Amino acid sequence: MFPQFNGYMSTARPLSAPRTPDLSGFAREVADPSRSAMLVTLMDGRAWTVGELARQAGIARNTASGHVRRLVRAGLVTESRQGRHCYLTLAAPQVADAIEAIGLATGTLPPTRSLRGRRFDDELAAGRTCYRHLAGRLGVGLLDGAVARGLVTGDCALTDHGRAWCEAHAIDTAPSRRPLLRPCIDWTERRPHLAGALADRLAAAAFDRGWIVRGSHPRAVRFTPTGRSAIDA
């Protein structure tokens, strides 16, 4: 029976649904294996050309151009032109957070049968960039060491001792619109590593000073002897 009131058909309108983020659009873009491979490549925090992304995804450059246009329209990737070249980066740290969260939810790296693939897997698990900060066993170990030395609290807040250490190493501790430090669950270690503006600055300083270098995989990183001595000290 239709709803009635005093013998007349009710004219009450259903309440409108609250506005929510459009997750379906994001899901459509990351569902494609080629676009997914491109986004994961951009997780190293560097700028890549279309041709470079095409090689990483194992597809033709023309095909990659179409995928890149979709990612740009979706707001996941930003392009900037410099001369004849177009460079692509992730649009925001929040995009990197979402990709890392998906990796955490779906599991670790898929199994591979090639020696090269297994070497990449081992390198990524040992140490990698999670967008602009450090992850893997290297990143988790940094957080453990910082907590043990009283530089950071257990809930990832910078202590006075930690601030002094950063200042002694010329690492900026000024506030940012983003959290200075926050925990980020590592998708291979299943434990937190350090994220946030200060974690990004620490990683940038480590690269600039030769404390860490990149490995065979674009996202893989490892300590140099100089870096190991500096961190241990």
Image (spheres, rainbow, N blue to C red):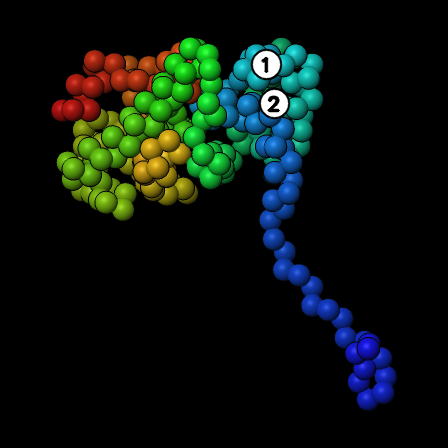
Label 1 sits on what residue type? Gly
Cβ atoms under marks 2 and 1 closer than 8 Å? yes
Task: Tell which circle, 2 or 1, labels the residue nearer the N-terminal end.
Answer: 2
Q: Residue 168 carries which label?
A: none
Who's the residue at 32% across and 38% down the image? 191
Image point 66% across, 61% down: which residue? 17
What secondary structure is marked by label 2?
helix
In the displayed structure image, the side of residue 77 where residue 122 appears, left or right? left
Q: Which residue is drawn at 37% across and 31% down?
A: 188
Q: Name the residue under label 2.
A: 34
How packed mark 2 is, by other alpha carbons closer than 10 Å (few <14, some 14-19, many 20 or more), is many
- Expressed as whole percent of the image width and height from the top left, the position of residue 227 reads 23, 18
Residue extending farthest to the front is 113
Give amino acid for label 2.
Answer: Ser
Q: Which of 138 and 85 is in front in this view?
A: 138
**Residue occupying the point 15% across, 36% down:** 149
Q: Camera-side residue: 177 or 126?
A: 126
Q: Where is residue 175 in the image (x, y as percent from the top left)?
A: 34, 41
**Does 38 sit left or right of 201 as displayed?**
right
Instruction: For residue 97, say whether it is visible.
Output: no
Q: In which quarter of the image is residue 222?
A: top left
Residue 8: x and y in percent read 86, 84
Residue 147, compared with residue 116, is above or below; it is: below
Q: Above or below — where is 77 with respect to 54?
A: below
Q: Quadrant of residue 9?
A: bottom right
Q: Name the residue under label 1.
A: 58
**Residue farthest toward the right in the current orientation of the protein:** 8
Query: Is 47 placed above or below 159 here?
Result: above
The span from disc 2 to disc 1 (Cα, nearest Å) is 8 Å
Would residue 127 appear left or right of 98 to someone viewing this image? left
Q: Quadrant of the C terminus?
A: top left
